[in-house]
Amino acid sequence: MAEQNNTEDKQFSIQKIYTKDLSFETPNSPTIFTAKWEPSVDFNLGTNTVALDNSFYEITLKVTLTVKCGDTIAYLVEVNQAGIFALSGFEDHEMGPMVGSFCPNILFPYAREVVSDLVSKGGFPQLLLSPVNFDALYGQHIEQMQQQSPNGTNTLN
């Protein structure tokens, strides 16, 4: 019965989702538009968590793309998609997955839309980012942290 009450005490809500920062560069325009379009994409993701007052957290998902045709950069995109989330009643071991996987998973579709819009408005073919398994990425992060820890314990949960 105590376990059931603990579950009822957990509260999660989305307070705000917003684009915190974005950048789009086409360093080789207009000549890149005359090149044969055979792009290669370098895609990077990162997250940042800032604890705010009273169980509120700002989670920022950073998406960085470098698209090249051969050795020439076609465009660079950087989007920091953020959200303010209210998280209360979660145990310490539950907070890591919430801020490291669950919240970024909510933010990703918004970042994906911003990237698609920026690329299209920049004059390039639409770029649709594939879905991301944030649970797997978070698991890999925890595994790396355990390997780096001298005693093999997980300090982030």
Image: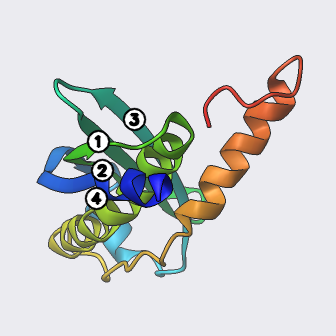
Q: Are marks 2 and 4 in contact (CB under 8 Å)?
A: no
Residue 9, numbered label: 2
The answer to whether residue 31 is seen in the rendering is no
Residue name at image x 26 percent, y 52 percent: 11
Viewer-side label of 2, 4: 2
Residue 29, numbered label: 4
The answer to whether residue 90 is seen in the rendering is yes
**Residue that sits furthest to the front in the current view:** 1
Instruction: Count residues near mark 2 (Cα–Cα under 10 Å), then give few for <14, some for 14-19, many for 20+.
Output: few
Whichever of callouts 4 and 1 sits on the residue coming sooner in the sequence is 4
Whichever of callouts 2 and 1 sits on the residue coming sooner in the sequence is 2
Q: Mark 3: which secondary structure?
A: strand
Whichever of callouts 1 and 3 sits on the residue coming sooner in the sequence is 3
Residue 48, numbered label: 3
Residue 56: image quadrant is top left
Residue name at image x 25 percent, y 37 percent: 58
Instruction: Count residues near mark 4 (Cα–Cα under 10 Å), then give few for <14, some for 14-19, many for 20+.
Output: few
